[in-house]
Image (cartoon, rainbow, N blue to C red):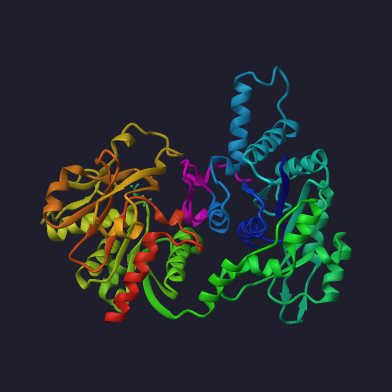
Amino acid sequence: MPKHIFVTGGVVSSLGKGLTSGAVGTLLESRGLRIAVQKMDPYINVDPGTMSPFQHGEVYVTDDGAETDLDLGHYERFTNAKITRESNYTTGRIYLNVIQKERRGEYLGKTVQVVPHITNEIKDAIRRASLQEVDVAITEIGGTVGDIESLPFLEAIRQMGWELGRENVCFVHLTLIPYLRASGEMKTKPTQHSVGKLREIGIQPDMLLCRTEQHIGEDERSKIALFCNIAPSHVIEEKDVDTSIYEVPIVLAQQGLDELIVQHLHMQAGKRDISVWERIVGILKDPQRTVEIAVVGKYLEVTDSYKSMWESLTHGGIANGAKLKLRKVNAQDVEKQGAEKLLSGVHGLLVPGGFGERGVEGKIAAVKFAREKKIPYFGLCLGMQCATIEYARSQCGIKDANSAEFAPDGPDSVICLMDSQKQVVDKGGTMRLGAFPCHLQKGSRAQQAYGADVVHERHRHRYEFNNAYRAVLEKAGFRISGTSPDGKLVEIIELEDHPWFLATQFHPEFKSKPTAAHPLFRAFVKAALDHAERT
Ligand code: GLN
């Protein structure tokens, strides 16, 4: 039976619970323990797939095709845990299951209630995620303690603490210790109240992780410990890191968090080895080179909306011993001001995924600029579709080439709705989702980067390259270097007459790790470094 760690958050949202849960996973794995990581989200959407990136940030896609919270991306980047559809539940999904059971008559005439039926469903979901062979299951409870929505989740984990026994369950509470600059003081009261709220529910945290801008002195630590009913040694400081989020496991290790957890859970564990993380942070702190990459997108104000892409770029940098300078360019600004003005001087250009017509002509103009000026170009999903449209327009004389997403009745849909999407009516969970095999063409840039003939990459789209235009584009020098095994779906395109121009229908950013950069991100950053040297 696995042990359980439950991570809750207090005082404010966006404290980095996902990141912290991932970092706890890193530390436990570094001691030879096998882990599962899971997130419970209190909102009512069945999954985040239908939410706008402005509302929710990135929708992270798993191998098995679930559209999930972006914190699952942190889990995959920080740990080797197997992340699946079972790794993310929302209130909506829990209720949907319960209501479907009720309709099937499975409650045998009982009145269906939040306690015990919803809480039982939550506990089943937590148990299912830890059915794999693991020693410890880490479950993050989304939201902030005190929210109405998270109550059933807190009640469920309270029950589990009671049922499994205190040596089998560890409650970790992440909180904020604000610093008031005007009075030069750290304030512990919000944390006292948040822990008070948890104790009202019946949960006594075992460890307190305190997010803070300043070092927490012994006086404050004792005060927090006293008011929160916790040993001072179990009050851990999680101070803002200077260089990179990949420092978080190191900061927590310095304070022995892993040892406290291992002791609390009465576990046998090996010696900690996080040298690989120390090496990564070392590279980021003292990079040998810097290179400037522009990203032309439309959700750039919200940093979370392309989370995995930013991280993957960083990983590409780490793999090349380089630090990236990122130029965030709004696609609509490119439409108004022109590519030359906004993109001159960059060493690489990336157009990420996206939906809807707004800004698309700016992205196409950016692709044209990169192609003509021979600046390394990397397109992800919509970025591949824009590259196809641009090539058809400029190199094949198809002046009205477009995607059926933006011009449904246009004469030349070089990007068209996938056959499998034509009957789809519902919006939620119905795109082409999850990992599919992709065959790489021998001698292509893609095959060289991967060093493999077949790869599996994750998808999230409804539109695709239209095969009716394949011959014409290929004749004009457009190389199709990756396809589905039957050759029908175009998954990677590249240009030969260019230092590095490659775009994918899938999302490689979901499979990159700081400890193992995705081959295409590594190759793209390398190409940008080469470009920087040439110019
Ligand atoms: N909107 C495009 C499609 O649905 C691209 C999707 C994406 O970039 N994820 O095919």
Relative image position of residue 103 (x, y in whole percent): 60, 21
Picture quarter containing residue 93? top right
Picture quarter containing residue 182? bottom right
Q: Would you say 420 lies left or right of 69 here?
A: left
Relative image position of residue 229 (x, y in whole percent): 88, 59
Q: In this rendering, does residue 513 appear at all?
A: yes
- Report the span colored magenta: 41-68
Q: Would you say 363 lies left or right of 310 here?
A: left
457 or 186: nearer the eye?
Answer: 457
- The question of residue 270 being in magenta is answered with no
**Does residue 68 sit above or below 494 in this rendering?**
above
Number of callouts in the render? 0
Q: Quadrant of the C terminus?
A: bottom left
Residue at the (26%, 75%) spot, across then down: 340
Q: In this rendering, does residue 358 appear at all?
A: no
**Does residue 210 sit above or below 120 in this rendering?**
below
Q: Quadrant of the N terminus?
A: top right
Residue at the (65%, 62%) spot, across then down: 15
144 or 123: nearer the eye?
Answer: 123
Residue at the (36%, 43%) spot, across then down: 437
**Does residue 189 sit above or below 158 in this rendering?**
below
Relative image position of residue 64 (x, y in whole percent): 47, 41
- The question of residue 48 being in magenta is answered with yes
Residue at the (33%, 36%) spot, across then down: 421
Q: Would you say 36 lies left or right of 451 here?
A: right
**Does residue 529 sit above or below 296 in this rendering?**
below
